[in-house]
Image (cartoon, grey):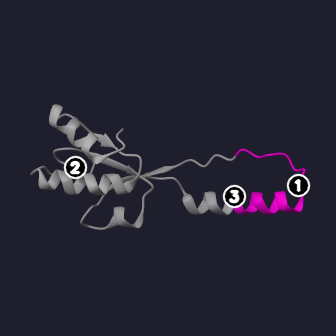
């Protein structure tokens, strides 16, 4: 897992057997551009996985495999919990877990 494009490109330069997962899709998208500029094919030469499954990940120019954290569901649940806390300030805290999914595209 990498947090920056330069870090990822160093990793690729050291080991062509590398697969890279990034902290979010924007880094992965920048990495796809950097790999192409270096003459490498994302997905074929270096598998890449992002995180967030943004709308950009689905564009044909990127076709990025990405973890979908179910942001809409998390947001809706957070609003419900907030409204409950406003209604009842003494209400105990609530832990919520939402299982992410993997949207598979050609980058990995």
Q: Which mark is residue 78?
A: 3
Residue 105 can be seen in this image: no
Q: Which residue is mark 1?
A: 89
Q: Which corner quadrant holds the N terminus?
A: top left
Classed neighbour count for the residue bearing mark 1: other residues with Cα under 10 Å, few (<14), some (14–19), many (≥20): few
Q: Position of residue 14 (x, y in %)?
A: 17, 31
Q: Residue at x 64, y 46 (%)?
A: 97
Q: Of circles 2 and 1, which is in front? A: 1
Q: Position of residue 21 (x, y in %)?
A: 35, 43
Answer whether residue 103 is magenta in the image.
no
Q: Position of residue 3 (x, y in %)?
A: 37, 43
Mark positioned earlier in the residue sequence (2 or 1): 2
Disc 1/disc 3 C-alpha distance (Å): 15 Å
- Name, please, the residue furthest toward the left: 39
Q: Residue at x 82, y 59 (%)?
A: 84
Query: Which residue occupies the foreground of this view, 6 or 98?
Result: 6
Position of residue 43 relative to residue 12, above or below, is below
**Quarter holding residue 18:** top left
- Name, please, the residue furthest toward the top: 14
Q: Which residue is mark 2?
A: 43
Secondary structure of the residue carrying numbered label 2: loop
**Quarter holding residue 20:** top left
Secondary structure of the residue carrying numbered label 3: helix
Q: Of circles 3 and 2, which is in front? A: 3
Answer whether residue 94 is magenta in the image.
yes
Please state if 4 lies on the left or on the right of 18 as rendered: right
Position of residue 2 relative to residue 86, above or below, is above
Query: Which residue occupies the foreground of this view, 66 or 24?
Result: 24
| Numbered range of the magenta stretch | 79-95
């Amino acid at each position: 897992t990498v947090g920056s494009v330069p870090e990822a490109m160093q990793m690729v330069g050291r080991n062509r057997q590398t697969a890279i997962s990034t902290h979010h899709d924007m880094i992965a998208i920048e990495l796809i551009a950097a790999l192409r500029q270096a003459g490498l094919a994302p997905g074929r030469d270096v598998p890449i996985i992002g995180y967030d499954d943004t709308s950009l990940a689905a564009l044909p120019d990127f076709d990025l495999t990405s973890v979908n954290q179910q942001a809409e569901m998390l947001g809706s649940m957070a609003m419900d919990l907030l409204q409950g806390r406003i209604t009842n300030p003494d209400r105990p805290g609530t832990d919520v877990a939402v299982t992410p999914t993997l949207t598979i595209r050609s980058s990995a």
